[in-house]
Amino acid sequence: MGTFINLFSYDFFLHAFWASLFSAISCGLIGTYIVSRRIVFISGGITHASFGGIGIGYFLGLNPLLGAAVFSVLSALGIQFFTQKGKLREDSSIAIWWSLGMAVGIIFIYLSPGYAPNLMSYLFGSILTVSTGEIWLMAALSMVLIVFFLIMYRTILYVAFNEEFAKATGLPVNRINYLLISLIAITIVLNIRVVGIILILSLLTVPQATANLFTNDFKRMMLLSVVFAFLGSFSGLLISFFADIPSGASIIFTLVILFGLMKWISIILIKRQKATIP
Amino acid sequence: MKKLVEIKNLSVGYDDEIVLKEVDLEIHENDFLGMIGPNGGGKTTLIKALLGLVKPYEGKIIFHIPAAKIGYLPQINQIDKRFPIRVLDVVRSGKADGQHFSLFKDKRAEIERAEALLQEMGVIHLRNKAIGELSGGQMQRVFLCRSLMNNPELLILDEPDSFVDNHFENELYGKLKELNKRMAIVLVSHDVGTITYYVKTIACVNTHLHYHPDNMISSEQLASYNCPLQIITHGDIPHTVLKLHDKEDQHGHVH
């Protein structure tokens, strides 16, 4: 226990703690929307498209995350636009953005002079090297999301549940869709440093699947997702620290183990419930 | 009689394909209009035009009532049954009040209204259930509650009789008859034989619209309206088989 408390006296560990908290908040909230709306694949497309921005960032000597932000928001709006217009099959459109982004990223990294430092940390995450500036950005995003979901809760819920009906009742469906897809893109980019491009989908889906075991209410699912995301990523962080394995992978592994454990508990709970009802 | 909606020379199309052509229709208060026609004939598109969800290509729709006074029950296959939402929230989503910032809404009156409707439809005990836990009939009741949230003057139902059992079907139509005392109803259905029991007038939609100012309609009349549906006359047979549907299954009707 002594060593555990001591960990918090290290700057890098404190950073990692805050990073896992804010990533749990942002991914927990946004992920619930993604899972409920069944747009996991769209989110995968946005995530991988952002790699193009990382490549260009390297090439131009800018912060790769800035490039990723531009790319992911643009691809998000692009996918939403094509989907709404319906000229192109949605899944095909997603695949195009997905692979185009990866291709652009690889080309520009290849063209960049010298060795690309930290490339692996963008692909697989590195929560222990998250900078103070990045933590402030993640904190700001978490605040924005909390306020947004708090004041627009019903509008978001109704649009997500039944878009056409929401349109008929006069809700600003398109504006909500574009706003949310942009927030998804920003959430993805700011969490790339935590678990990486390849693994981020799990932070947006596994805690939500775990939460869904216990509730069928959108609001509660958001809250529980944040809790499970934090439990998973913080214990994953500890495991990665003590076992000396990559943090991104360790977090995902912990999240999935947590899901398995909770599934088992929920089965027991359901059995008990049935047993009490004669 | 008060006119609620007038459709004048309406044409609607997607891309280059014309789905509805030169449609004229008036809906008055206390109307009970059954809308029939083959799959892909434009029934759902006409409803979407009435709800302002698709833009007319030509012609216009004149509304004499505010948009919020049109209640809508969409086809049930439009709904994601695994979406994490509870029955009470589904019903409340029918409230159209132009307030998008839910935090500052007056919730009490809205909840009371939703609960009163659930009570009226006999599904109040389901108020905290997730929508996916409900049977087809229960779900339709909940969606009917949702469509009634704004006290509509015109209620539009898009195939409320699909995926429900006969028992509920009869109950639903009985309920609609009762509601018809308070509001006009447009009912889209595949089930020509059954709905003619309840509706007052019929509209056959197959690209063009033919209005039939009576609830009795013969196969010959249907044929003359270019609306090739088979009629089994008013009787005990619960389901009319439509010629055009013989080879299709029940799923994925897209209009």
Image: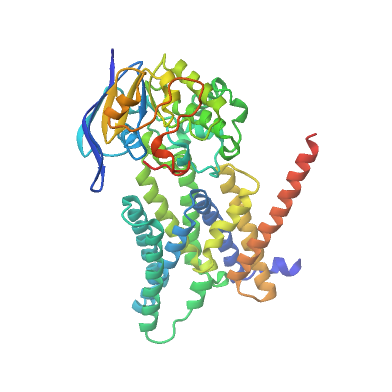
Q: Is residue B206 visible?
A: yes
What quarter of the picture does the C terminus of chain A occupy? top right
What quarter of the picture does the N terminus of chain A occupy? bottom right
Counting from the top left corner in percent of width and height, residue A85 is at 31, 51
Query: Residue B124 versus residue A32: which sits nearer the camera?
Result: B124
Among the 4 quarters of the image, the one containing residue A60: bottom left
Counting from the top left corner in percent of width and height, residue B35 is at 35, 28
Residue B232 against residue A158 in the figure, above or below: above
Residue at 31% x, 54% y: name it. A87
Query: Residue A168 versus residue A254: which sits nearer the camera?
Result: A168
Instruction: Judge left or right: residue B63 versus residue B195.
Output: left
Residue B196 against residue A220 in the figure, above or below: above
How was the colour assigned to the protein in this rendering? rainbow
Instruction: Judge left or right: residue A200 versus residue B157.
Output: right
Query: Residue B97 versus residue A201: which sits nearer the camera?
Result: A201
Query: Residue A57 versus residue A14: which sits nearer the camera?
Result: A57
Residue at 21% x, 39% y: name it. B57
Q: Is residue A166 visible?
A: no
Counting from the top left corner in percent of width and height, residue B147 is at 44, 28
Instruction: Judge left or right: residue B238 versus residue A109.
Output: right
Q: Residue furthest front?
A: B220
Residue B173 against residue A26 in the figure, above or below: above
Count of labels in the image: 0
Counting from the top left corner in percent of width and height, residue B144 is at 48, 27
Residue at 46% x, 20% y: name it. B176
